[in-house]
């Protein structure tokens, strides 16, 4: 079947303070795929997510959302689809309960009755394995649980507005700072949400962690020096002769990747 491009970056460049980070990147994200962006620290992986999300304007090049060119950033106008973003930090409001955090947008901006929002929150919490946690505060949860709350918040949608269902989720290092077992829970959850009704079948993730890359990616792109240096399937990682990819996965300081101390 023909793959449907959801988001396309064409010739996208981005610099910060005159220092180029992304240099004419071409990248197509297809519906239904699990794409993981990898590469050394500071190469612009999170920047790609922010450009895709429309939080940051491109310096040069174009972003297409379902074939329509996006002008400016998301705040500048109508978007043909919702893009959900799970930040590196769970970024929950400490003074609000789990229910108020997950339902925040609906409590603030929808006309849904409170008990209906509460039901929607409960359903999303059940999806991420946190049933019965609605009245807790973030400080009463583990790091992995807070992360799962942020997944529920990203996925909750107003049932009165079909356009509110996210069509792609962007995960920025969802397992960073978690122990290996908590990481596995999150990796399994990411995959489960891809196939669950009420989840989202397309995602782009940034990760450094070997297990996360291998367990959550269909396709991997390797970013370095402003360019996509390599692209392949997970099972091609161990067979590639690309010296940059080999150095990264062998964690060697010797090779083409230059780390700045
Ligand atoms: N808003 C900004 N203003 C100035 N510099 C920025 C800004 N955002 C990112 N940078 C710089 O751009 C570079 C790329 O940042 P980015 O966070 O995209 O990298 P990354 O590959 O995600 O890194 P890491 O793996 O360490 O999270 C870094 O050197 C960062 O300091």
Image: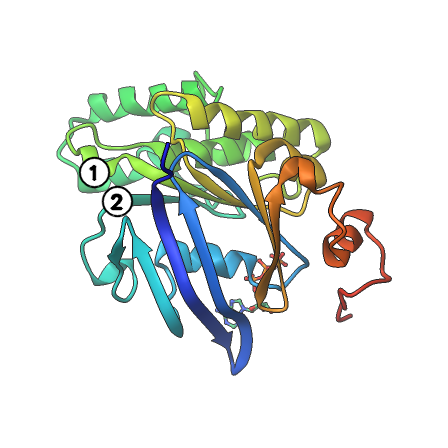
Determine the image quadrant of residue 40: bottom right
* Residue 161 percent coordinates (x, y): 16, 34
Kindly tell me whether residue 253 is visible in this rendering: yes
The verdict on label 1 being within 8 Å of ligand 1 is: no
Label 2: state its secondary structure.
loop
Q: Can residue 173 be spotted in the picture?
A: no
Which color scheme does this rendered protein use?
Answer: rainbow
| 10 Å crowding of disc 2: few (<14), some (14-19), many (20+) | some
Which of the pair 141/76 is nearer the observer? 76
Q: Which mark is residue 163?
A: 1
| Rendered location of residue 174, percent (x, y) | 56, 40
Left/right of residue 19 with respect to residue 69 in the rendered view: right
Q: Does residue 107 appear left or right of residue 33 in this picture?
A: left
Badge 1 density bin: few <14, some 14–19, many ≥20, Cα 10 Å: some
**Which mark is drawn over residue 81?**
2
State ligand 1's quadrant.
Answer: bottom right
Q: Is residue 256 left or right of residue 202?
A: right
Q: Sequence order check: which comes first, mark 2 or mark 1?
A: 2
- Judge by depth and name the residue closer to the eye, 42 or 241: 241
Q: Residue at x 28, y 19 (%)?
A: 119
Residue 144: x and y, percent?
58, 32
Q: Quadrant of the C terminus?
A: bottom right
Residue occupying image coordinates x 32% and y 32%: 156
Picture quadrant where residue 1 is located: top left
Point out residue 82 in the picture as x, y percentages from the top left corner: 29, 44
What residue is shown at x 42% (from left), y 20% (from top)?
Answer: 127
Q: Is residue 127 above or below residue 106?
A: above
**Do residues under tags 2 and 1 come within 8 Å of each other at their CB atoms?**
yes
Q: CA distance from mark 2 to mark 1?
A: 6 Å
**Residue shown at 38% from the left, 54% from the top:** 8
């Amino acid at each position: 079947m023909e793959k449907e491009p959801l988001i396309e970056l064409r010739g996208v460049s981005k610099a910060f303070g005159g220092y180029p980070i992304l240099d004419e990147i071409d990248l197509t994200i297809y519906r239904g795929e699990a794409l993981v962006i990898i590469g050394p620290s500071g190469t612009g992986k999170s920047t790609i997510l922010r450009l895709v999300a429309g939080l940051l304007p491109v310096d040069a090049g174009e972003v297409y959302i379902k074939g329509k060119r996006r002008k400016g950033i998301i705040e500048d106008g109508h978007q043909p689809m919702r893009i959900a973003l799970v930040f590196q930090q769970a970024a929950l409001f400490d003074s609000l309960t789990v229910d108020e955090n997950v339902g925040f947008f609906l409590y603030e901006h929808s006309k849904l009755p409170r008990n209906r929002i509460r039901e929607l929150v409960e359903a999303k919490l059940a999806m991420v394995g946190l049933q019965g946690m609605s009245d807790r505060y973030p400080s009463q949860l583990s790091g992995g649980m807070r992360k799962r709350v942020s997944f529920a918040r990203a996925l909750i949608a107003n049932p009165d507005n079909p356009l509110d269902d996210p069509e792609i989720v962007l995960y920025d290092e969802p397992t960073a700072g978690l122990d290996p077992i908590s990481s596995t829970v999150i990796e399994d959850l990411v995959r489960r949400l891809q196939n669950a009704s009420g989840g989202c079948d397309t995602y782009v993730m940034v990760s450094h962690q070997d297990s996360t890359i291998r367990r959550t990616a269909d396709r991997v792109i390797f970013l370095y020096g402003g360019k996509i240096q390599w692209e392949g399937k997970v099972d091609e990682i161990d067979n590639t002769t690309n010296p940059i990819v080999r150095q990264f996965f062998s964690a060697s300081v010797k090779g083409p990747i230059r780390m700045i101390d």
